[in-house]
Amino acid sequence: MPGFESPKPAPDAYAARESDVLPPFTTNAWLRFDGIRNGISLAAPESVLEIGAGGGASATWIARRFDYVGVEQDDRSRALAQARLGAVGRGRIVAGLDEVSGARFDLVCAFEVVEHIHDDVAALSEWRALLNAGGHVLLSVPAHADQFGPHDELAGHYRRYDRDELITVLEKAGFSLVRLTSHGAGLGQVLEWGRNQMARRREVAPTIEQRTAASGRLLQPHSAAILIGCAVLAAPFRVLQAPIASRDLGTGYVALARMSP
């Protein structure tokens, strides 16, 4: 699609410019942002570890406010995240959890990540070991298992989550749910339809690992005009979805959970 996903290596002058204007979010990311922001506010962390930082869209917002470390395995996405954090002047990006061995954090975040992991309970248990006592995990995931479609396959998803399933996964990993909200009602369904139509025309990489590695670069805004357009388009729907965030009407969930005693 015109205006999306440059084939060139990610770091460039725009990476520095955009971080001074708005977080470089897609429209979908804006729809889940209020749930994420509220979850971080409830957790009240000083230090944050983000798993699957992608191109650093969330990193640019989080690193301004907290001690931030992001983990991103994909080289291209990590390079862009590093450039964006360089413009912010805070936070760092590493290639794997082994590079934060021995460190502890107040909050572990993973936005649109656990659906890419075959054993989600094992992953969450591993992340739990990186938390300080009383720490939290904050997740965003695609909602409704029966809505699994072509875009999920293209992006390398193993699953979408129903509410009860997500709560069960968190509990098995040693967490207690604090807050779970839904987002994307209305506009989210339209965007999902468009992504599925696009995915039907795209070649799917042969392995789920390859699809996952490239997923952070799918449909990313890479011009100031598109960046602003994403924020403007999402704005009224963020207001409209707020009163129904406790209901299962959206296309995704944001869940905040605390380490169980």
Image: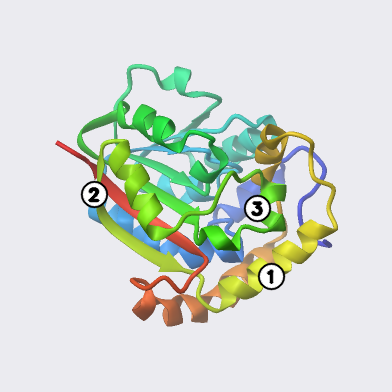
Q: In terms of secondary structure, where does tag 2 sit?
A: loop
Q: Can residue 11 be spotted in the picture?
A: no
Residue 152, labelled with which disc? 3
Q: Give the amino acid at mark 2.
A: Ala
Residue 223 is marked as none
Image coordinates for residue 55, horizontal then vertical, percent:
61, 43
The residue drawn where x is 37% and y is 78% is 244
In front of the other: 116 or 228: 116
Give the residue drawn at x 39%, y 51%. 166
| Front tag of 2 and 1 | 1
Secondary structure at numbered mark 3: helix
The percent coordinates of residue 238 (x first, y second) are 46, 75
From this view, report whether residue 63 is shown above or below residue 124.
Answer: below
Pick whichever, 97 or 182, lies toward us: 182
Q: What residue is disc 1 on? A: 193
Q: Secondary structure at mark 1?
A: helix
Select label 3 or label 2 by which is in front: 3
Which residue is identified by label 2?
44
Badge 3: few (under 14), some or many (20 or more) residues near its Cα, within 10 Å? many
Q: Which amino acid lies under the numbered mark 1 shown in the image of this protein?
A: Trp
Going by the numbered disc 3, the residue's amino acid type is Asp
Q: Residue at x 48, y 53 (%)?
A: 141
Q: Earlier in the sequence, mark 3 or mark 2?
A: 2
Give the residue displayed 33% in from the left and 60% down from the top.
Answer: 180
Tell me which numbered mark, 2 or 1, is placed earlier along the sequence.
2
Confirm or deny contact between disc 2 and disc 1 (CB under 8 A).
no
Q: Residue furthest left?
A: 261
